[in-house]
Image: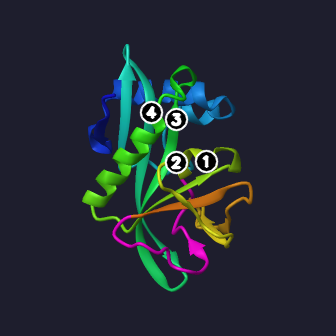
Amino acid sequence: MNITLVQERDVSRRLDEKIKESLCLCFPDDVATFSVTRAWHNTAPSWSLYSEDNDRIISHVGVVDRSIRVGDKVVRIAGMQNVFVLPEFRGKGFCDALMNAAMVKAAEYGFDFGLLFCIPDIEKVYERSGWIKLPPSSILVADESGKEGVLPGKNIAMYFPLKLSAFPVGDIHLQGNDW
């Protein structure tokens, strides 16, 4: 399986369109967003990893570079966004390979942790790759206008240790919207 890394500044118009097409297939409830942008909640990735087959993007993860507050500490996280594998390619190790490659690159780039949000139904997918569920805590977000709120309870937070091994204790403030 060939995984390609691309910095956001190097994403061509055609690659952007191909990623959005596959996002729409994998997240039909979010077609209104993904037909226009890959920036979930107006948060664009800094870089992405993907694999292709027959000129289609079949798996993808975008990585957001952000410093967040956890309790009284500031940590740099590689936030995973827009993770997908096209349905016909699921169960073949694409997600595991993609997430592992993303964390190897994030370690090279000096991130403290990987961080993602998912629904409980897919928690096991990330656990296979070494992601650890955070205990329930308050996760604060801030929208484009600066209005603060709490991340909806349907989402669970998971982290991946990189430069630091133990995630700090305390409420989490994402210093922006979720991704």
Of tags 2 and 4, which is closer to the observer?
2
Name the residue tied to disc 3: 84
Quote the CA–CA distance across marks 3 and 4.
Answer: 9 Å
Quote the CA–CA distance across marks 1 and 4.
Answer: 15 Å
Left or right relative to 5: residue 142: right
Left or right relative to 118: residue 63: left
Instruction: Give, as a three-letter code, the residue at label 2.
Output: Arg
Report if the CB atoms under discs 2 and 1 are less than 8 Å apart.
yes
Magenta span: 162-179
Q: Earlier in the sequence, mark 3 or mark 4?
A: 3
Quote the CA–CA distance across marks 2 and 3.
Answer: 16 Å
Q: Secondary structure at mark 3?
A: strand
| Residue at the spot 67% in from the left edge and 73% down from the top edge | 137
Left or right relative to 164: residue 28: right
Image spot of residue 92 (x, y percent) = 48, 28
Quote the CA–CA distance across marks 2 and 4.
Answer: 12 Å
Q: Which mark is residue 94?
A: 4
Q: Is residue 10 above or below residue 31?
A: below
Within the image, what quadrant is residue 177 found in? Answer: bottom right
Name the residue tied to disc 2: 128
